Image (cartoon, rainbow, N blue to C red):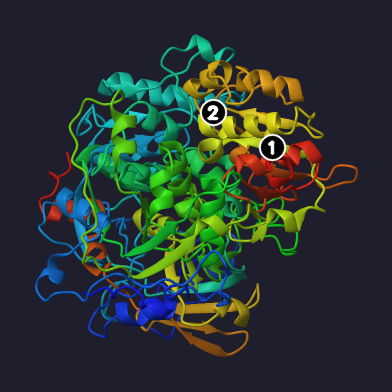
Amino acid sequence: MAVSYSSSLSTFSAAAAAAAFSETKPSIGPASSQAVRFPSISSARPFIVPFTSNSPVVRNQRASFVAPRAAAESPSSTTTSPTSFHGLCYVVGDNIDTDQIIPAEYLTLVPSNPAEYEKLGSYALIGLPASYEKRFIEPNETKTKYSIVIGGENFGCGSSREHAPVALGAAGVAAVVAQSYARIFFRNSVATGEVYPLESEVRVCEECRTGDVITIELGESRLINHTTGKEYKLQPIGDAGPVIEAGGIFAYARKTGMIPQSA
Amino acid sequence: MASSTIASPSASFIPTKELGRSAFSPASSPFSVPKCRKSISKKIVSVMAPQQSERKPAATGSVKTAMTMTEKILARASEKTHLSPGENVWVDVDILMTHDVCGPGSIGIFKKEFGQNAKVWDREKIVIIPDHYIFTNDERANRNVDILRDFCAEQNIKYFYDIQDRGNFKANPDYKGVCHIALAQEGHCRPGEVLLGTDSHTCTAGAFGQFATGIGNTDAGFVMGAGKLLLKVPPTLRFVMDGEMPDYILAKDLILQIIGEISVAGATYKSMEFVGSTVESLNMEERMTLCNMVVEAGGKNGVVPADSTTFKYLEDKTSLPYEPVYSDQQARFLSEYRFDISKLEPIVAKPHSPDNRALARECKDVKIDRVYIGSCTGGKTEDFMAAAKLFVASGYKKVKVPTFLVPATQKVWMDVYSLPVPGSGGKTCSQIFEEVGCDTPASPSCGACLGGPKDTYARMNEPKLRPLLQVCVSTTNRNFPGRMGHKEGEIYLASPYTAAASALTGYVTDPRDFLQ
C-alpha cells in the first residue's frame, strides 16, 4: 500500500509523493515489536486513530504474523499510526462480495504463510465481472497501483473469509472508503490491520472515477479528490477507540489482564 | 442505550428502517446503525397482512431489564445481569468451529500470538471439520487438511472429523462433511450457548436457540487461546410468521422472501429472530435453512426459540446439560415484520444477488442447463426428501438437464440411500433419483456451492458461450458473480421443490406445476 509520511497535514515529501505513485510499495518503517494490531471489534463505525502533528509518524505496520516484516522490527519504534493516505483510487459499486474480492478457488492459500500471503494479493478483485474494464491489477503484475478502493453499500458482503481484506492489503491497498460495510468484512479488516475500513457520508463511489488522485486525511475525517477538486466528509471513529488505542484485540486483552502477557 | 419499541401496528408491515434508526440512535450515543439506503417498495404484499400488535404498554421498571433472546444469551455468556444493544462485551465461547479453508490461517495466528507451544483453551470445545475442498487433487487443499490433522494431534483435539482416503469417503469413519450440518448432527448445537465458527453460515446453529455467528481467522486465533471474544450486542429484528405452510412451500422460500424484503444489508449488525406458528411447525432442518441465510441479509445471527421439536432432536445427540432462553414479553425489538405464510408463493433469487427476489412462476421462460441440490442450505436429508417427493408426484418424469446431488454429510448420504420416501411405495431417495435420471449422489462436502478448486464436482467452469447457457437453479445460499465458478454463470437460488421442478422442465419452474 502506498502511504505518505507527513508530520504536517498539508505537505508531502517529494519522495513520498513519488512513492505513492509507484507501483511498488515504498519501504515502510518497522512495526513495534509489541505487535500492534487492529482489534476484532464489532463496531459499525470506522476508526480514525488520533494523532498530533508533533508526534513522529511511523506507519503502523500490519499484523506481526507476516514473518519477513517481523524480522525487520526495530525494538525502539513507537506505535503511532498513519495520518493520511495518498494515491490513486479504484472505484467499485454496491454489494461487492467476498467472491469478487477473492474468488473461492484461491482460498487454499493460507494468509499466515508469507509466500502465500503475497500470492493472495496478486488475485485481489480478480473476481470483478468483465464490465470493469480497468483491471485492479494488470495482467502481468502482482501488486495494484490503486492504494485506495472506493465502494458503495455493503462492501465485503458474503463470506467470513479473512482472505478478503488480506488480499486487498497484500495487493497494496491502504484504505477502503465505502458507504457501508458488511460486518464480518469490517471486523476482519480491523482485526488484521490490512486495510483501514473508512465510511463515507455520501455516495463517494459516484463522485470519483478509477484513477482519480485521492488524499484521505484521517485526523480530519476528510477525503480529497485532487482530480475533481472536491472534498468529502468521512464518518468519525466510533466505539472502536479503546481497543484500537490499546493496539488491537491481543494487546488490549493483555493490557486489561484478560489474557496473560505474551511468552 | 435504548432500542426502539416495536413498530406500531399500522406500520408493522412496512419495513421500518427509518423508524428503527431514529429511535435507535439517540444523539448522546456514539453508536448508530449503519444505514441501508436501498429503497424498498412500501406496497402492501398479500403475504404481509397488517395485524394488530398484542403487546401491552411497557410497565415502568420491568422494561429496563427485559431482553431479547440474543441479549440474554450474550448476557449470560458475559456474566452480566443485563445487556443492551450496542454494548461491547467479552463473551465466553462454548464451541469454536473451523474447517479446512480457514483453519490453517487461524492456527497460524494462534501460534504466532500465543506461542508455538501454546495450548488451546479447551480441547473439548474446538470442533475441526474439513468440508470445503476435500475431493480434489489440488495439492494445497489437501495440504490444508494435513495441517488440521497435525494441529489436532498436537493439541489432542477431541472432535476432529478427519478424512484421509479421498477416493472413498465411506472408508473414513470420522469424516462427516459440511460443518454446519455436522455440528447439528453430532450434538454440538445446544440452546442458550455461544457458538462461533470461521464460516459465514455458522449462523445456521441459531436454529437451536443459541447465539451463533461467523468470524475471521484472527478472531478465531484469539478464541483458540483465550476462550472468549469481544462482541457487540446486536439489536433484534423480529420476523413473525403465521399461517399454515402450503404444501409447495419450504423454509427456503420463507428466507428468500425475507431477504428480498429487507435486502442484502437489511439486517447488517442485527439479530434476526424467527417466531410464530409457522416457525413452530418447522422441523429442525427447516429451521436450520431459515437461520442459514441470515448472513445473506447481512445479519449477525439468527435465532429460533427452542421448543419440544428442538429437545426431541437433541435427545439422542448430546448429553451435556443446556438451558434455553427466551425473549421477554417486554423485550424491545428494532422492527417487527409479520407474514401470512398461507399466501406465500414459491420464490427464487435471480442472478446475481440473494435479494433479487422473484416469483418462480414469473421466471418460467428462463431456460436452464443444470440443477444443483446440495450445501448446508439445501443438501440436508429433508431437502433431498423434498426433491424426491416432487419427482414422485410428477409421475417419475425424467429430468431434462444434468441434476447434481451433493449430500451435506455422510449421515445425509446414508439417509438418501436408506429412508423410504412417503408416497413412493417404499422407495428411497436414491432409487427415485436414479429412476428420473439425476446424477448419482456425490461424496458429501461443500462441493460446488462456492466453486472451489477447478476440478470440483459440478463446478460451473465454462463461459457463457452458446450453446452453453451456464444457468443453474441451485438450493445453495449465494449467487454473486462467480459464486459457483465462472463469473458469467447465472445462478437462481431456490427451494428443493423448485429445483426439482426446474430439472423436470429445463426451465425455472414453479413446483405447483407438479405438486398440485
Q: Nearer the viewer, residue B235 or B35?
A: B235
**Can you identify the residue that label 2 sits on?**
B445
* SS at circle 1: helix
Which is more toward the observer, A170 or B280?
A: B280
Circle 2: residue type: Ser
| Proximity of marks 1 and 2: CB atoms separated by less than 8 Å | no
Any part of residue A236 in sight: yes
Q: Nearer the viewer, residue B516 or B301?
A: B516
- The structure residue drawn at horizontal position 56% and vertical position 48%, both measured from the top left corner, is B246
**How many tags in the picture?**
2
Quick one: which residue is furthest to the right in this view?
A: B467
Tags 1 and 2 both on a single chain: yes
Which of the 4 quarters of the picture holds residue B384? top right
Mark 2: secondary structure: loop
Q: Amino acid at mark 1?
A: Ala
Instruction: Say whether disc 1 or disc 2 marks the residue closer to the N-terminus.
Output: 2
| Residue A135 horizontal side relative to residue B119, left or right | right
